[in-house]
Structures are given as C-alpha cells and as structure tokens.
Amino acid sequence: MKKLLRYAGKYKLQFLILVITVSLQVAAQLYLPNLMSDIVNNGIANGDVPYIWQIGGFMLIVAFASTIASVSTSFLASRIAVGLTTGVRAKVFKNVETFSLGEIDKAGGTATLITRTTNDITQVQRFLIMALRMMIMAPIMCIGGIIMAVGKDLFLSQILGIVIVVIALVITVIAKTSMPLFKSMQKKIDKLNLVLRERLTGLRVIRAFNKDVYEHDRFDDANKDLTKTTLTVNRIMSFMMPLVMLGMNIATVLFIWFGATRIDSGILQVGDLMAFIQYAMNIMFSLVMTSMMFIMLPRASASADRIAEILDIETTITDPEMPKRTSENGGYIDFENVTFKYPNAEVPALSNLSFKAGPGEVTAIIGGTGSGKSTIFNLMLRFYDVTSGSIKIDGVDIRELTQKQLRDKIGYVPQRAVLFNGTIKENIAFGDMQAPMEKIENAAVTAQALNFINEKDEKFDSVVSQGGTNISGGQKQRLSIARALTRDASIYLFDDSFSALDFKTEANLRNALREKTAHASVIISGQRVASIMDSDRIIVLNEGEVAGIGTHDELMKTCTVYKEIVASQLSEEELAS
C-alpha cells in the first residue's frame, strides 16, 4: 500500500482540506451531546423555555455545519481515492505497454494483468474511500469521546473502558481469522478470469471438439472455489456486527443502570448521563468503523501488493539515452552471430545466426516447427533482445535506436492475424492513422483484399468484430498485409502470412507485393517451398541452428535438410519444372 501512496503527491492540498473538514465534523458531533446536556439540565429541569429555544437553535446550526462537513468529507475522500487509483491504473497500463513478451510471462500472463488493472485497483479504491475518512475521524472521535466521557463521569468511564477492550478483542480475533481468506480471494479471481478468457477465446475449438461440458466443469470448479472462500469470509464477518451491537446494547444497559443510581445519589445529572451514553456510542461506533477498515485492509493490501509487483517490474527493453539515427530510405539488415535463449529455457532458440539483406531483396526463412522462424521477427522488432551478437539496420545496432525509430521502419504481418474492433478502413489505417483513402485502397488492392471488401454492403466502413471473428482466416491475413503496406516501410516482415491463402490468391499477392516492396528489404517465413523458392536468399533453420543459406538451386546441391523439405512437398515433375 505504501508503494501506491507515492502517487498521491498532487493530492496534498485536497488531503489537508479533508483533514480540516473531518476535524470540524468530529468537533460538531462531540459538541452536540454537551448542548443536549445543557438543555436537559438547565432548560427542561428549570422550565426555561427561552433557554431551550436558544440552545436548540444553536444545536440546529451545529448539526447543519456537521452535515456540510460530512458531505464535504465524503466528496473529498472519493475524489482523492478515485483520482489516485485512476493515476495508478494509467501507470499500470503504461507500464504493461512497455513490457517485453518475457516480462508479460513473468507477470503471470494476460488474465492476471487484466485482474490487477481492474479488480485489484477497485479493491484499493474502495478501501481508500473508507480509510481516508476513518483514519482521521476514528482516532479523533475515540480520543475526544473518551476525554469528554471522563469529564462527565469517571466511574462510568471505567465500565466503558472494559467494554471497549472486550469489543476490540472480538474485532481482532475476527480480523485475524479473515485476513488469509481475503488474500486468497484475489488469486481465485485470477483463476476464474483465466478460465473465462480461455472459454471465450477458444469458443470454436471447444465446440468443435465437443468440450462444452468439460469447460463448463472447469468454470464451475473455479467459480465454486471462489464462492466457497467468499461465503466463508462473509460468515465470519457476519458475526462481527451482531457481537459488536450486543456489546454496545449491554453497555448501554449498564450505563443506564449504574447511571440511575448515581443520579439518585445526586452525583450525576440526567443530561450528563444522556451525553455520556452518546459519547460512548460515538467511541464504539469509531471502533466499529476502524475494525471495518482493518478487515478490508488485508484484501486491499493483497491487491496493492499485486499492483506494486507490476509497477516494480522494470522492462529490459529500453530506449538508449542518446539514440543514433539511420538513413530514411535504408533498409539494410545485418545479423551478426545472433544467439538468443528464451528466459528459463535450457537451450537457445537461435544459435550463431548471421546473414545480410538489402533493399530490393527477398529473404525467406524455412524450417520445421520450433526451428526459430518467429523468433527472428521477435528479435528484429525488439520484443526480445539478443542474448549475444547483434542485429543492425543500416549499420546501426537496433539497441542504439529508440523503439519508435525501429518500428517506424518496419511493416509487420504476424503469424496469427490480429484485427481490432472497428471498421475495415480503421484496421487497414492502423499502420498509418493519417493515411488518405487512396492509400488505403491501394494497400487493399495489393493485398488482394479489394474484391471481398467491395462485396460487403458498407465496403470499407463494414464493421470488423473483435479479433475479426466475422471474417475468414484468409480475409484476416489479407487485411493484416494491407495494414502493413500502409506504412511505406523500408523493411517488411511476413511471418508465415500466406498460410490461409489459396495458391492463386497467393501468387497474385506475391506478384503485387514484388512491385509494391521493390524499394524495401523483405523477410518472409513459411512452410511451403513453392512460396519461397524464387527468393533471393533462403535461410534453412533446423532446431535453432542454420542448416544452410543460399538460393533454391544452391541449397538443393548443398543442404540436406532443405532437400528433405522439398522432397516432402514437391513431386519430381514439379522439381524438374
């Protein structure tokens, strides 16, 4: 919690005003019983009606002032708490945006990041709204009430002290029992979110394999686990208020019982007894509110710790203090003995990879599953940094460029086409938000996407659902390619981006791309030999190591791995042609 409060600096003035309003509210509440005592002892006892009206009117003024202070306190507490958590939420989101893929895995994945950004921060916000009022009000109310109560009657104050100790012990036992349960609830919410997210994102696969019942059982187990813990906490908490109220009522009976005997003896006046009981109720009320705050604290503290974990993760992918610059229209790529090992992996995903590529050249990467093809693209985009060696663009190590400089030079089409909720036009223009309509249409033409776009009723204004679930896989790939082409980049990366296309569409797309990307360096990865055999350079990967580099003809003579891949896909007639 302390780590989060470091973001509260700009609310110092509002917090000072909050302290003043709370103090005024408490002072008014402590003063009212004294006024009531005066009315009873001096006004009613003596039949002095003008005095009753005078003090009664003053009580109304004090009560009104207390109401204004209470409203102001609630407003300020909410404003500070919501403002603080809004800032923390923005900071968490901004921090997550800078994470590399490795750091996202370190944080626990997307499900827990969503929970921490939403539910955890909401728990902290609820606690702060209450704590900002109670942590000021309760101590002042308790100490002030005790002083005023002792001033009215010392003997009754001793009884009050015993009651306070008993109530405090009950609250402590209940709070200590509930603390571990509150902490475990957030982890169980994480689990529930994870199961729900997998259920929604994998809906088609789940239904295709008739796993609805299995997934329902998984969700039911996670849901029941969370429900069981929540019910246990609520059962424990449900004992607190009845026990505290019982203690307060017993205390009231004791005060009246002993107070009556002291009034009969002439030691205490009726008005003073009424004031004492009011002070006792204020003191015990402040204890109850403090206990509620401390019972909420474990869950809020657990949430705050989880948020702080995200804020404390320092991204390893950072911009240099003095970045270098590259030529605007370059695109020369140089891999020098690049080795990369994923965090906690036993063996490198890539070992000693070296190659060069320049504008106007097409470099293809082929290899089996897990050979390291996508890793090359992740390294070029600095989603990860190389373990050893270097990647240079136009003679400058990419670690000496800002991430914006680097990625502005690259048009990237991922292996899994990702589209966003919005129109087709907005998705294509995602590569260049200022792109004119003509440029968007040209990108769609090159990507072989114009035909299916024009078939839609609203054409470029047709809505794409989240994840592109309302269009086919091939259409998603073509829109992803069009999005990359709007960048007019000097380097284009196509990570197995033609796998969902038929051969005719792919052939037309490649011909159009050859003209569109003639000025740029192009790196493609794929599984189909027919798609890459006419490339200027083919890199053959086998279990993270380079098995061969050359043209198709050269590799057919020198690379056994490549010949095996070709033989598995092409017939002798196709090879001969």
Image (cartoon, rainbow, N blue to C red):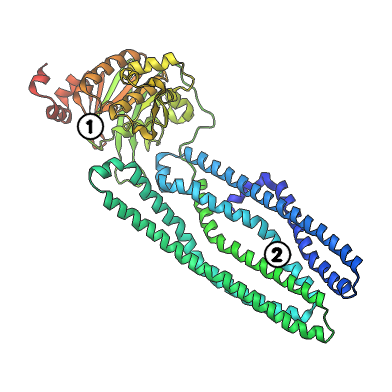
Secondary structure type for disc 2: helix
- Quarter of the image containing the C terminus? top left
The residue under the point 48% across, 41% down is 96
Q: Quadrant of residue 159?
A: bottom right
Q: Image check: 177 left or right of 61?
A: left
Assess disc 2: are there few (<14), some (14-19) or many (≥20) residues with their C-alpha within 10 Å of its C-alpha: some
The residue under the point 67% across, 67% down is 285
Q: Can you name the residue that lies furthest to the left here?
A: 572
The residue under the point 45% across, 64% down is 231
In x, y percent, where is residue 395? Answer: 42, 22
Q: Earlier in the sequence, mark 2 or mark 1?
A: 2
Q: Image check: 218 left or right of 2?
A: left
Q: Is residue 308 visible?
A: no
Between 247 and 447, the one nearer to me in the picture: 247
- Quarter of the image containing the N terminus? bottom right
The residue under the point 43% across, 49% down is 112
Total numbered circles: 2
Kind of residue at disc 1:
Gly
Kind of residue at disc 2:
Pro
In x, y percent, where is residue 51? Answer: 90, 67
Between 256 and 116, the one nearer to me in the picture: 256
2 vs 1, front mark? 2
On the image, numbered disc 2 is attached to which residue? Answer: 139
Between 94 and 227, the one nearer to me in the picture: 227
Label number found at residue 367 = 1
Q: Image check: 209 left or right of 12?
A: left
Residue 73 to residue 489: above or below: below
Secondary structure type for disc 1: strand
In x, y percent, where is residue 157? Answer: 74, 78
Q: Quadrant of residue 468?
A: top left
In x, y percent, where is residue 89? Answer: 54, 44
Residue 91 to residue 260: above or below: above
